[in-house]
Amino acid sequence: MIKSAGQTAPMKKSDYFYDLPQELIAQEPIEPRDHSRLLVLDRKTGGIQDRHFYDLEELLKPGDCLILNDSRVLPARLYGRKKDTGASVELLLLHPQGQDRWEVLAGPGRRAKPGNILVFGDGLLEAEVLDVVEEGNRLVEFRYDRNGPNGGNFYSLLERIGEMPLPHYITHHLENAERYQTVYSREPGSAAAPTAGLHFTPELLDRLRAKGINTGFVTLHVGLGTFRPVKEENITDHKMHSEHYELSAETAALINRTREQGGRVIAVGTTSCRTLESIGLTDGRIEPAEGWTSIFIYPGYPFQVLDGLLTNFHLPESTLIMLVSAFAGYEQTMAAYAHAVKERYRFFSFGDAMLVV
């Protein structure tokens, strides 16, 4: 397995900057999903191919396996009002903290003080602010009719009254919220989509499996901390937020079988990558696991599990472009990004994809 050439890679945030014209930030998903473009980067040679995502079945080999993140994005943005004054308030759900309790971002903060009652969806949902926690976030407890039309299911209620928390750089209204979900999403819990998976269609997955390319699933609930800007100039001073992950016995067995038979383990997205590398290998094998990870992968990191990475194009100076640089090599990653800008690829969540093998 080729390791990152990143031992000599720059460790300054500014070294991961690239100039991106505003018009290359994709505002809407492409139709069909698998008609996005695909930049293929060869880690051995630095060679680049310009392909399309539907070419994936030609680029992968029988015996390879794709590891996909099946987390589903919560419609986690709630618009409501203070019960006593009617003043508007907005919550963004971050992390569950037990039965009906969540850590949230609240705005404006002065309207979300401990003891305040907030109302959403014409009274279908209430939240009491319990405390102010780390970084000014709020701990709230939700109340709703457990015998109501949603069967007392909090997530069903969210689907009804919540809105999709699109990234700040997407300014267009999303007509179909399912386009910010992967076609295989099934475990609700993310504050943002694992966007590398947005390009797959059920038909493409069927064609890949028919060719002998296996698919396995992990769950990592994407938190907003993943996209928190790196403020420190020395990237090693940056601290990641924790995110919850789960790797099943079935997926662990698939990865071990793939490795034993000489196939490649290809992570679909940085979230799948971070899950696999957080668990790592024990005596050459990966074991089922569940827990929290705050792993920060940057050049010099010794990969244990990955042989390939399928990912989107990421923001300048982000932890995600640093992860790609760790896997593909810093110089090759920045050259690939320069090529993508020159060839006018579409960037970020609704943009095009990149396969590093």
Image (cartoon, grey):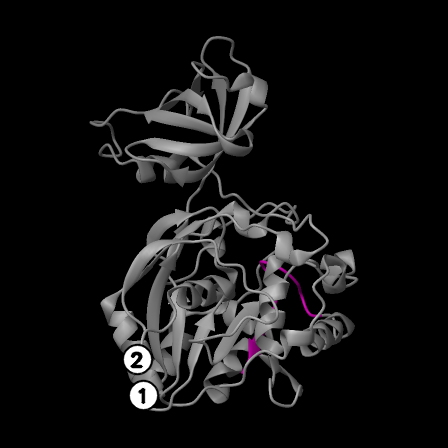
Q: How many marks?
A: 2
Q: Which residues are magenta?
A: 345-357
Density class for disc 1 (Cα within 10 Å; few <14, some 14-19, many ≥20) is few
Instruction: Report the amino acid beneath label 1.
Output: Glu
Q: Position of residue 245 (x, y in %)?
A: 37, 56
Tag 1–tag 2 contact (CB < 8 Å): yes
Rendering coords of residue 146 (x, y %): 22, 27
How many angstroms separate mark 1 from mark 2 (CA)? 6 Å
Q: Quadrant of the C terminus?
A: bottom right
Q: Check the image and report above or below for 305 versus 12.
A: below
> Nearest the camera: 185 or 64?
64
Q: Residue 335 placed where, x, y %?
A: 73, 77
Q: Which residue is mark 2?
A: 256
Secondary structure, mark 2, is: helix
Q: Nearer the viewer, residue 224 or 294?
A: 294
**In which quarter of the view is residue 254 placed?**
bottom left
**For the residue marked with disc 2, what is the amino acid?**
Asn
Reply yes or no: does residue 22 show up in magenta: no
> Residue at image x 69%, y 75%?
8
Q: Residues within 10 Å of mark 2 (few under 14, many from 20)?
A: some
Residue projecting furthest to the left:
147
Q: Residue at x 35, y 26 (%)?
A: 142
Q: Is residue 116 left or right of residue 187?
A: right
Whether residue 216 is situated above or below residue 82 in the rendered picture: below
Q: Secondary structure at mark 1?
A: helix
| Left/right of residue 202 with respect to residue 35 in the rendered view | left
Among the 4 quarters of the image, the one containing residue 115: top left
Judge whether residue 351 can be spotted in this image. Answer: no
Helix, strand or loop: magenta stretch: loop
Q: Which residue bears the numbered disc 1? A: 260
